[in-house]
Image (cartoon, rainbow, N blue to C red):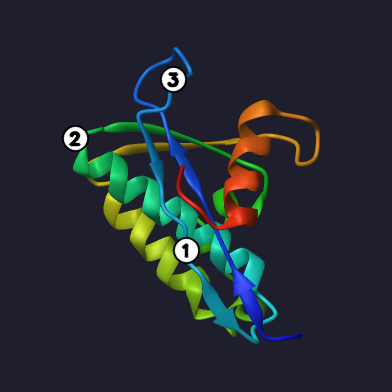
Amino acid sequence: MQKGYMRSAVILFTNQNHRPHRFAFHRQYITLNKYSANIAEINAVKTAIKAANSLGVTDLTIYHDWDGLAFFAYKSNIKPRHEDCQCYIQYAEFIERKRMNMRIRFVKVKAHSDNKLNNSVDRLARVGMVI
């Protein structure tokens, strides 16, 4: 795999009216890791949880387009074949700690299905900018 930049983005809503409360970050990862895209997705979730926590949110729904985010949120799903990427274990432990004080749900949206919000987050991640 080529060395390159991985970016991730988050749009945080604190109510149901689809008006963003906060656009959270981009972070670039220079990597040779075959799990680069997964690591970027995991870090976006961790950033969303940290941002929600800083706002006092105790009930969080995360919309995502990669099944691994919900799957790897449980240590019991991590098998020996996954252990060469320590990020999965660290992610599961992070989610486990945060679930002590926050209800966290994952909702899968189909990637590349013209979902307006998913398109917006993908666009933010591609350009690597916070609006």
Mark number displayed over residue 75: 1
- Sequence-earlier tag: 1 or 2: 2
- Please identify the quadrant where the N terminus is shown: bottom right
For this rendering, which residue is in front, 87 or 3? Answer: 3
Give coordinates of residue 21: x percent, y percent: 35, 29
Q: Name the front one of labels 2 and 3.
A: 3
Amino acid under label 3?
Arg
Q: Residue at x 34, y 55 (%)?
A: 96
Question: In 3D space, how far apart are the residues under numbered discs 2 and 3 (Cα atoms)?
Answer: 18 Å
Give coordinates of residue 44: x percent, y percent: 48, 54
In what element is the residue under mark 1? helix
Amino acid under label 1?
Lys
Give coordinates of residue 66: x percent, y percent: 67, 50
* Residue ID for mark 2: 56
- Sequence-earlier tag: 3 or 1: 3
**Quick check: 83 above or below 13?**
below
Question: In 3D space, how far apart are the residues under numbered discs 3 and 1 (Cα atoms)?
Answer: 34 Å
In what element is the residue under mark 2? loop
* Residue ID for mark 3: 19
* Residue 74 in view here: no
